[in-house]
Image: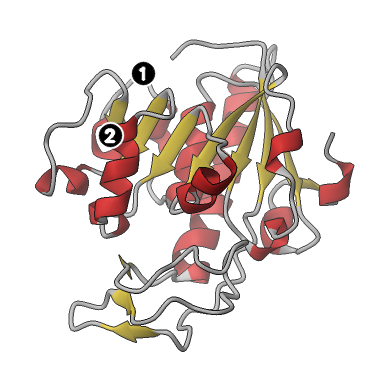
Amino acid sequence: MTTTNKEVCIFGNGKSLEKFDFLKIDRNKYDIIGTGMAFRYWNKIDWFPNIYVNVDTVVCQNPEVIKFVKEEKCQFYILSKSMLQIDQTLNPEKCLFIEDLLQFPASSFKYVRNWCSGTAAVVCSLDRYYKLHLFGFDCDYVEFIPECIENVDGTLTIERTPDVNPNYFFNDYQRAGDNYNKPNGQRIHMTSWKELSYIIEFLNKMWSENPIEVTNYSSKTSISKYFSTKFLSEFH
C-alpha cells in the first residue's frame, strides 16, 4: 500500500453507530477501514470497506470470518495468523498478518506493544493516510452479557443471539456459537489507545511536514481523552 491524498474513515462497532448511515459516505473522498464482525451488517446493506481488520486470535478462527475474507470483497485484510490454523488457502496478495507486521521494520507497527483490532486498524493507516476519522470506538464494554458463558481457557462463547447487545451498533453482531476473547476494555483497549496517541505524537514530531490529523466522532468520552473529538453529526 502506498500513500494517498484521500482521507480515511476507520470504524469500530460501538453502540454510538446504531443509526449511522454508512451509505452516505463519499467514497471518492474517503477510503474505509472496517473491523471485527461488522461484515454481518455490511452484507445486509451491500457496502464494504477498502481494508478489513480483525486481529483477535479467537474471532479470526470463526468460519464466517474466514468465509468473508475469502470472498475478497475488500482490497486488503489485516488478520491474525491464528486464522491459518483453520485455513491456509488465503490470498497472500491481499492478506497481511499482524504477527508479521510487528516484525517489519518499514511498518508503523514496529512502534506497537499493545493492540486491539481498533488500534491495529489505525496503525495500518499511518503509512498511507494523513487525515484519519474515527467512529464507533466507544470502549464502554459490558464485559459479560447475559447471553455469554466463560470457558475454561478464559474465552467467552455466545450461547444465544442477543435480542439487545449493549456493546455493538447492531444487536446480532454476536450470534449463537461465537467464541471471542474477553473485551478487557480498560486493561487492553484503553491502554492500546493511550499508547497509540503517543505513537502518533511521536510520528508528528519526526515528520512535521506531513502531520497526521486524527478526529474522533463520538458523543461518548471513550477515546476522546486521547484524540480531538467532535459529535457524530459533525461529520460530512
Label 1 CA crowd tier, 10 Å (few <14, some 14–19, many 20+): few
| Disc on res. 95 | none
- In terms of secondary structure, where does tag 1 sit? loop
Residue position marked by numbered label 2 in the rendering? 70
Q: What residue is drawn where x is 29% and y is 28%? A: 95
Residue 173 visible in the snapshot: yes
Q: What residue is drawn where x is 33% and y is 54%? A: 56
Quadrant where the N terminus sits is top left
Q: Amino acid at mark 1?
A: Ala
Lateral position of residue 95 relative to residue 200, left or right: left
Q: What residue is drawn where x is 42% and y is 40%? A: 53
Q: Earlier in the sequence, mark 1 or mark 2?
A: 2
Q: Residue furthest right?
A: 234
Residue position marked by numbered label 1 in the rendering? 106
Q: Residue furthest bottom?
A: 146
Label 2 CA crowd tier, 10 Å (few <14, some 14–19, many 20+): some
Point out residue 57 in the picture as x, y percentages from the top left corner.
26, 55
Point out residue 83 in the picture as x, y percentages from the top left corner.
20, 46
Point out residue 236 in the picture as x, y percentages from the top left corner.
84, 34
Q: Quadrant of residue 141?
A: bottom right
Lateral position of residue 18 relative to residue 46, left or right: right
Out of 79 and 3, give the one closest to the viewer.
79
Out of 51 and 106, give the one closest to the viewer.
51
Out of 69 and 192, give the one closest to the viewer.
69
